[in-house]
Image (tube, rainbow, N blue to C red):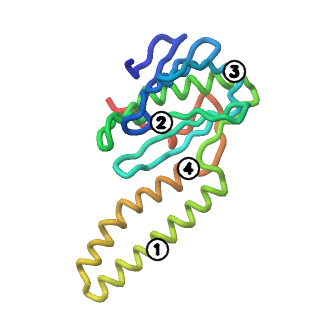
Amino acid sequence: MNAGMTDAASLTYSQRSKPFAREVIFRLEPQVLFVDTGKKDERIPYGEIASVRLVYEPKNITSGFRTTLTLKTGRTVSFTNLDWKSYLEYERRDAAYRDFVTELTARAARANPALACIAGRPPVLWALTAALGFVTLGGMAFALAWAASQGFWSYAALAAVFLVPFTFQVHGLVLRNKPASFSPPSPPLRLMPVAKG
């Protein structure tokens, strides 16, 4: 099934969350979120969604965004903006993902006024990620400076090769995933992919 959006009453989004996984189809029906995992179909009433969490997830070869729904039963349902075809091949579904998340959050909030709309990682996990990231960055920067000062140019170059992309990953993880809440239907732009074209 195409990942694009359909009419306003029934929006559809589909993806494979990891290489070679089954395609999961999500459809916003008037009263329920329909989920087809390829093994079973499920209809989740919007009022049963207790929270919506949006996070940024940098990967080895790309960066992605994840939406996690927590139901009142405690069970979670999640999906991302990346549709994986193989270990190295994927398709970005940025526009469809952004539109689907925005409408899903709006419908869930209408059905459940107590819906928690959460941006970023939990505070403790975010703080640990930030601390570990900055300590690691500091260590890599020190190693680069030490190697350069000693004339070990190959080691310095190797440290620089790892330092630059790692800096961007830490920057994204920390700044984008800062814990906050948001009001539907306006997800924070820092946790939404930018659609191109």
Instruction: Tell whether label 4 touches label 2 (CB within 8 Å).
Output: no
Taking the spot 51% from the left edge, 12% from the top edge, the residue there is 8
Disc 2 designates what residue? 80
Q: Earlier in the sequence, mark 2 or mark 4?
A: 2
Taking the spot 70% from the left edge, 36% from the top edge, the residue there is 74
| Residue 97: image location, x then y, percent | 46, 29
Q: Earlier in the sequence, mark 1 or mark 4?
A: 1
Q: Earlier in the sequence, mark 1 or mark 2?
A: 2
Q: Residue furthest bottom?
A: 150
Tag 4: amino acid: Asn
Disc 3 designates what residue? 110
- Considering only vertical position in the picture, is 163 above or below 177? below
Secondary structure of the residue carrying tag 3 is: helix
Residue 156, quarter of picture: bottom left
Disc 4 designates what residue? 177
Tag 2: amino acid: Thr
| Residue 49: image location, x then y, percent | 68, 28
Disc 1 designates what residue? 138
Distance between the Cα atoms at labels 1 and 4?
21 Å
Distance between the Cα atoms at labels 2 and 3?
23 Å
| 28 or 44: nearer the viewer | 44
> Crowdedness of circle 1 by 10 Å Cα count: few (<14), some, many (20+)?
few
Distance between the Cα atoms at labels 3 and 4?
25 Å
Secondary structure of the residue carrying tag 1 is: helix
